[in-house]
Image: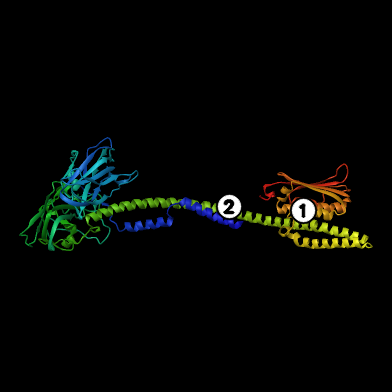
Amino acid sequence: MIRPLLCFALLLCCSVLEAALGGSAISELEARKEVIEQELTRLSRPSLRGGVGAIGYHTAAFSHADNDFWVEIDLKGEHSINEIVLVPVLWRDMEEGFQADAFPEAFRVLAGTAEDREGQVVAEFQQEEGQIIGITPLVIPFPETVASWVRIEVTRMSRRIHDGKYVFQLSEIMVFGEGQNIALRKPISAVFPKPRDPSGAWDERFLVDGATPYIMNSARGQPSLAYLGDFGAAPTLLIDLGESYPISEIRLHAVEQSNTVPQAFVGDLGIPKHFKVEGANSPDFEDAVVLVEHQSANLSGMGPIMMWSFPEMSCRYVRIVTLEQGLSFGISERLSRIGFAEIELMSAGENVAQGKRAWTEPAMRSHRDAMSLTDGRNLYGEILPIQAWLKELAKRRDLEAEWVGLSKELSRRYALQKQMLIWLGRISGVLLFAIVVVALYGRMQRIRNETKVRERIAANLHDELGANLHAIGMWSDIAQESVNSPEPLIESLKRIRGLTERTGASARFCSNMLEAKGVCEVLVDDMKREASRLLADISFEISFENEAQLNRVIRRKRIDIFLFFKESLANIIRHGQASTATIHMSANDKEVALAIADDGCGFSGGLPNSLKRRAKLMRAEAGVDHPKEGGTRIWLKLKVKRKTFIKE
């Protein structure tokens, strides 16, 4: 019994643990968390810019969220596009830190051509309950589509943090195709006119100026100090591409503005107030063509990465000519400096300037080498393509959100596991106690069973052999009396011989009469035969009521009834000195009853111990009566239970 109990306990513990922990195993969650942590070390980090600059665009404020609004970008010709990136406006919360502010909860992106002004929906977004946008960009890829315009239709706005009103606002929109930001500095229009903004930091055009609230921090590669010229000088920066390339975009990475809080510079360190970019195939720039000319009226035109696109132009040499130095916050001209962290010249989405020769005219005494302008690195490491960089920021947000979820789930499971271990310890203690109790109970049961077996063997020996021995003694007396009469003598000896054979057989089977074949197969016949044998010298009557029911009694009970009957007859012939006997046995659905009456003198002291023992073994009631008319009556009543009878 202990082994099944142990198996049950083990299964119970396993079931409880599985039901409690559920889902993936802790080891799987830990492995996934470790994979995420390793991958996060290889992804760009969302480092935020400081200083002053353009923020983006926002609508007027509303009192409800459901406002139909759209903003449309004219791509100036048909282009193949496959991805849109939306950069949120960031707000510094004193408790939660930086957060995306008033990012639309629901919108769809449509794209079409000049002939198709209705366009087709290429992407949709619906913010789920509890979903956090975070401070990184939202990247939405979609199937390759040819379009000359892209429209964002907002169907549900969100609340602005500082006043709780509903607005739509974004920092930047980028539309990528063929590895390039097709929307860069393209014309843009909105259904609502822009609200008045005295700061100059909000405008529709800032949605496509390429400026984001991030500093490129790829977290890989070796850092590189930006090139910064001599004080008061305004040298021309030149790059030799080695051969002619079709260039269509330039990206200028600003000099690091200091990492102190507050910053030492407002964001324009090293950036000329007015400059132009020229391209040529002749080293003396005799065939120079102006690619870009930029003049900043304020700081809104400056940022960590400044980008301009222009009609594709094949050239080998590129130069940046300063037309007016930056003199913000009253810095004198003799203290101004010109420099950049990196100059990228894009040809079919690839930076063809990386690793190429860069120099200044005139040459500067600056300790910072001009070759850092084209080394492909900034203060934080390797410079990535814009699209790849923004994708990494978006992927980091998703992985960090998953990491937080895994951490919470693991913490929950660790706490639950600890609680389960406590409960399992308690259950183990209870089970150990139960096992000890069961073991002791089992031992006691074995002892009781052994005692019962010994009692049954003793009773069988007494009941089976006692009657036979008494019969042998009786026939021996008859034989002695018939010594001069051959025929009675021979009959007595035959009877003695038969009794000795049956006694030998009984001695062999009395230890386990249940295994003995032919014993009490038909109870009624065996009782009649035994009565005829033992009561040969007594006149007797034997009757049975409902014999079919009697024969359905299980074999163990039949043997017990038979031996009780046999011992009762032995007592009649041994002590009763009776001349007649009456035997009646009946059975019904409630009990089996046996009554044996004789006209003898009976016996004193109540029911003999041998009959009491037999009645106890079969859990029956037994007794002896002395009728007024004389004689003795022995009775037995066996209460019927479901397992008393054999199933039909």
Instruction: Choose between 100 and 13: the one closer to the eye.
Output: 13
Q: Quadrant of residue 353?
A: bottom left
Near mark 1 (Cα within 10 A), the count class, few <14, some 14-19 or many ≥20, is: few
Write the residue at 28% across / 48% down: 135
Residue 479 drawn at (x, y percent): 90, 61
Q: Quadrant of residue 197?
A: top left
- Answer with left or right where residue 407 lies relative to residue 422: left
Q: Which quarter of the image is occupied by the N terminus?
A: bottom right
Secondary element at image label 1: helix
Viewer can see residue 561: no
Inspect the image, locate mark 2, and give the three-letter code of the amino acid beneath it. Val
Instruction: Choose between 614 and 105: the one closer to the eye.
Output: 614
Secondary element at image label 2: helix
- Answer with left or right where residue 327 lies relative to residue 510: left
Near mark 2 (Cα within 10 A), the count class, few <14, some 14-19 or many ≥20, is: few
Tally the numbered discs: 2
Instruction: Choose between 9 and 198: the one closer to the eye.
Output: 9
Sequence-first disc among 1 and 2: 2
Inspect the image, locate mark 1, and give the three-letter code of the amino acid beneath it. Asp
Write the residue at 17% across / 62% down: 371
Dots 1, 2 in contact, CB < 8 A: no
Residue that lies at the very extreme toward the front in this rendered image: 487
Question: What residue would you read off at disc 2?
Answer: 430
Residue 496 drawn at (x, y percent): 85, 61
- Answer with left or right where residue 488 lies relative to residue 634: right
Residue that lies at the very extreme toward the right in this rendered image: 484
- Answer with left or right where residue 107 lies relative to residue 374: right
Residue 462 drawn at (x, y percent): 80, 57
Residue that lies at the very extreme toward the top in this rendered image: 63
Residue 421 drawn at (x, y percent): 50, 53
Label disc, if present, on residue 525 of the rendered structure: 1
Residue 592 versus residue 497 in the image, above or below = above
